[in-house]
Image (cartoon, rainbow, N blue to C red):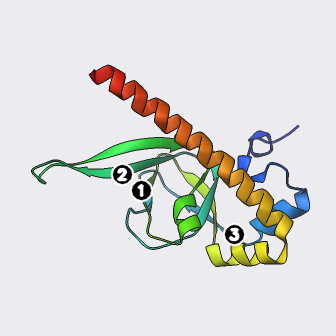
Amino acid sequence: MQSKREKTIFKIFEGFSDSDKKSILSLGQEITYDNGTSILMESVRTSDIYIIMEGRVSIDIGSVSFDKEFRSKIQLAVLRQGDIFGEMAFLENQRRTANVTAIDKVNVIKIDRNNLLELFDKNNHIGYIFMRNLSFILSQRIEDTNFMLRDDIKRFS
């Protein structure tokens, strides 16, 4: 019988052989976060990418009112087992664009950007498949955000 982890679809690994997956995962560090723990903070300069092995995280951004007195958070997404996060800073090698907080106890694989890019240089096929999968994931997230914004606009019109 397959374990829950084996049944989970890891979109980032679609099209990879088991050997290729192991090459990527061997670069990572497994980390567990308790619920409520801040994993990434907006504007911090780090560029690791994370794969959620178990649990859920909230992706949010800070919002400031016109009088700059009131700060709130706007939740952009909830990501689950099989999802990735940190991809924007990974791609741009720039500061983080959102906060990531553990909703449950979360187990992730954290992969250093430079180590992953070095693997891509050594094995272009792995790099191509990874970046292709990442582009599909980002495209889906943009589409989801467009629908969310469209629905908000309809509600307030």
From what the image shows, is residue 21 above or below residue 135?
A: below
Q: Residues within 10 Å of mark 3 (few under 14, many from 20)?
A: many
**Amino acid, disc 3:** Gly
Residue nearest the observer in this picture, 5 or 83: 83
Q: Which residue is mark 3?
A: 28
Q: Is residue 82 visible?
A: no
Label disc, if present, on residue 98 of the rendered structure:
1
Q: Is residue 111 above or below residue 103?
A: below
Tell which of 3 and 129 is nearer to you: 129
Foreground tag (1 vs 3): 1
Quadrant (top left, top right, bottom left, bottom right) of the N terminus: top right
Image location of residue 74, percent across then percent down:
34, 43
Question: Is residue 54 depicted above or below 22 in this figure?
Answer: above
User: Which residue appears at 63% of the width and 73% of the height?
Assistant: 113
Q: Pointers 1 and 2 in contact (CB under 8 A)?
A: yes
What amino acid does circle 2 point to? Answer: Ile
